[in-house]
Each structure stands twice: as structure tokens, then as C-alpha cells.
Amino acid sequence: MAVTINASTTTGLVQSADLSGSLNIQSNGTTVLGVTSTGTSVTGTQSVSGDLSFNSGYGSSAVAYGCRAWVNFNGTGTVAIRASGNVSSITDNGTGSYTVNFTNAMPDVNYSVAGSAGTNSSANGYRWLAVGSSAASDFSMLTTSVRVQTTYDGTNKTDSEFVGVAIFR
């Protein structure tokens, strides 16, 4: 037997049952948690207090450290975001220098920045994303943004067609 529990703003707590073999937790008629014999599904935006841990088949659960912000953008000409999460905009600071602005601030500046840069051009085809290296002389990490640079030889700044930046905290 399946049980559906619905927290309704008009009728209060409503419970119903059928023979499907599942458990559904609803809010105003929309299922937010479903449990069946094949697994669990969670819909909508959910919040977790404390550490989120899971086992991805490695034999034990471990804390998951999520990507707090990421962006894929075109760093040539007029800088343009292709896709992003928790990034409000990119500022072009000049040749090969960009500021990634966060939609929601980081809790502190103790985050890690990972990234890549590339081009379709054969001229100076290799690109590096400099974060905190000697090439990143104007590098800065703030709770609201991070400044990064792209270079073609590790020291000379150059614009890049493909720039990806991820922030982990």
C-alpha cells in the first residue's frame, strides 16, 4: 500500500493511500519527496543544514564539497557568459584579465579556484588560467569576486575564447 501525506494550506494535513507501494510527501499537492522500491526522488530546491555526505559506491560515506560557483565564458572581444552557476557577471579588465563576480558571496576568502582556458586559433594555441601565480600580478580573491588571468606562455597575458572557472569551498 502507498501512503501520500499532503501538507495543504487549505485543508491542513491530509493522508491518502493506494496500492502503488510508494510513499509520497507533498506540499500543497506537489510531491517533494517520493520513496519507491527502486529508490528515492527529491524534487524542488532543498536545503541541508550541516554536512551533506553520500556514498558513491566507494564503500563509505564522505562529506561532499560542492562547487559554489562556476562559469564558462568567451574572453575575446565583448566578454560573454555561455553558462554559469552563482556568477552574476564577468568584468573585462584588459588583455587576458577578468573578474568573476558572484551572485551570492562566499562565506570567506578561503576557497579554491580551478579553471582552464583555450582557443580555436593555432597561433599561441596553448592557454593557461593563472590564479595566484607570478603571472597574475593583479590577482585578488574577495568574498564577492575573484580576479583571474589567461596567458599563452605562463607570463604573457592574452584573451582566450574559452575560459572556465570553478570555485570550491
Image: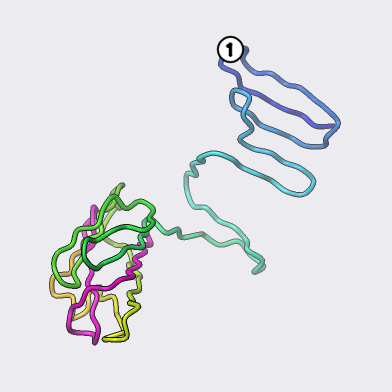
In the figure, is residue 70 to the left or right of 1? Answer: left
| Disc 1 target residue | 10
In the figure, is residue 135 to the left or right of 82? Answer: left
Question: Is 165 covered by the magenta stretch?
Answer: yes
* Residue 21: quadrant of the picture: top right
Mark 1 is on which residue type? Thr
Q: Colour scheme used in the picture?
A: rainbow
Of the 4 image quadrants, the one containing the N terminus is top right
Of the 4 image quadrants, the one containing the C terminus is bottom left
Question: Closer to the camera, 100 or 110?
Answer: 100
In the figure, is residue 27 to the left or right of 14? Answer: left
Residue 34: percent from left, percent from top: 69, 39
Residue at 30% in and 81% down: 127
Residue 13: percent from left, percent from top: 65, 18
Residue at 62% in and 12% down: 11
Residue 130: percent from left, percent from top: 25, 76
Vertically, is 147 above or below 128? above
Residue at 49% in and 41% down: 47
* Residue 91: quadrant of the picture: bottom left
